[in-house]
Amino acid sequence: MNQTDVIIVGGGLVGLATAYQLIQRFPATRITVLEKEASVAVHQSGSNSGVLHSGIYYKPGSLKALNCRRGKVAMEAFCQQHGVDYEICGKVIVAVDESELPILQGIHQRGEKNGVRSTIIDRDRLLELEPHAAGIQAIHVPEAGICDFRGVCRKLSEILLSHGGDILTTAAVKSIRTGNGEVVAVTSRGDVRGRYLVNCAGLHSDRVARMTGENPDSLVVPFRGEYYELKPEVRHLCRNLIYPVPDPNFPFLGVHFTRMTDGRIECGPNAVLAFAREGYRKRDINVPDLVEALTYRGFLRLASRHWRMGFGEMWRSLSKRAFVRALRRLMPGIRSNHLVTARAGVRAQAINPDGSMVDDFVVLATDRIVNVCNAPSPAATSSLNIGQAIVDKLSEQF
């Protein structure tokens, strides 16, 4: 049986960032990260959009807003210190018709309250920044950027191991028990005994939370986001980051253009129900996962309210022509033959029983256990600050 001080379930950005912040505050602490895959950052941390978010979208005073603003600064400093690729390249949020202007203004005002530096620009200035973009008006956010988050995870892992920590891969957690002043995680590689446990299990965070005795009201429902990629000869069509005005009733930002740190241009994602919590391909089906989602009253209520949008997203998943049509709202010159199929990611979205999507980060602390029950975008940008907040909660019990 492995013995440690703090068990962290999940080898993604939030889990590894928590380990890093523990090392900074309590360097003598023994830390063991449990990762069910063969390496770290396999799921959301390794398949996100790669964007350093500014915090412009989020409700002022929310955990998303506070952690994103502070986490972005921390992530930039970390990348600079440790030689991880990142770039502050700026982004534009584009209104393509007059109906979107009030929402655009609202985003700008929200950003100002969050301390985000941004400017509303006219079409002429937009074309200076992104010559191939559509739009009658836009928000320019010069402080937005891009980051190699897989590289961040590799460096965080190196730091943990160099300080005597452990990362147990292929160690799926089967159950958790507490008692006698300790927490025991029963895994596929044997039992791990510790004084404290932090659940950063991402797509499976609600299930791990229930193993600890926590009973979150929400259920994690997986949404797949599919991407295309611009062929190398047409990458000049997008200089940096081009985003649409998002639907205020939906937490997803809509299909957009993103330059990655390696120079590739990704186009997407859509947002469709995945038929498995790790359903990266259309043919990936996990029957228990699917039945759980389709029989959950929260999802059924969400689907009944947004069925038109849901069918639209599914159609874009099945039809490249429909996907291209959505992209052409932002870039009229884009053509189907400019695009090749790229990767897909899966977002863990917690949904409440009333059908509302959990819009903020949710971190619940009980005796010896901290559960991260909801950490969608901008969790990658925010991860170092989320880790710090988790350590704050643990330190109250040390």
Image (tube, rainbow, N blue to C red):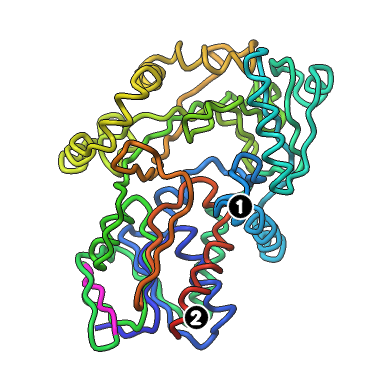
The residue wearing badge 1 is 61
* Residue 42 picture location, percent across and down: 40, 52
Observer-nearest residue: 41 or 224? 224
**Which mark sits nearer the N-terminus, 1 or 2?**
1
Amino acid type at circle 2 is Ser
The residue wearing badge 2 is 395
Left/right of residue 287 with respect to residue 353 in the rendered view: left
374 relative to 19, above or below: above
Give the class, few, some or many, for how many residues have Cα within 10 Å of label 2's Cα (few <14, many ≥20).
few
* Residue 383 picture location, percent across and down: 54, 58
Q: Residue furthest front?
A: 354
Kindly identify the residue that appears in the image at 47 percent across and 31 percent down.
Answer: 250
* Residue 165 picture location, percent across and down: 45, 79
Instruction: Identify the element where label 2 is drawn.
Output: helix
- Measure the C-alpha gap from mark 1 to mark 2: 24 Å
Q: Which portion, as a residue range, is magenta?
A: 182-187
Amino acid type at circle 1 is Gly
Looking at the rendered image, the disc whose residue lies closer to the viewer, 1 or 2, is: 1
CB within 8 Å, label 1 to label 2: no
* Residue 303 picture location, percent across and down: 31, 27
Residue 90 lies in the magenta-colored region: no
Residue 118 circle label: none
Q: Quadrant of the C terminus?
A: bottom left
Q: Quadrant of residue 350?
A: top left
Left/right of residue 295 with respect to residue 110 in the rendered view: left
Residue 186 lies in the magenta-colored region: yes
12 relative to 338, above or below: below
Give the class, few, some or many, for how many residues have Cα within 10 Å of label 1's Cα (few <14, many ≥20).
few
Kindly identify the residue that appears in the image at 78 percent across and 22 percent down.
Answer: 126
Observer-nearest residue: 195 or 281? 195
Kindly identify the residue that appears in the image at 46 percent across and 77 percent down.
Answer: 394
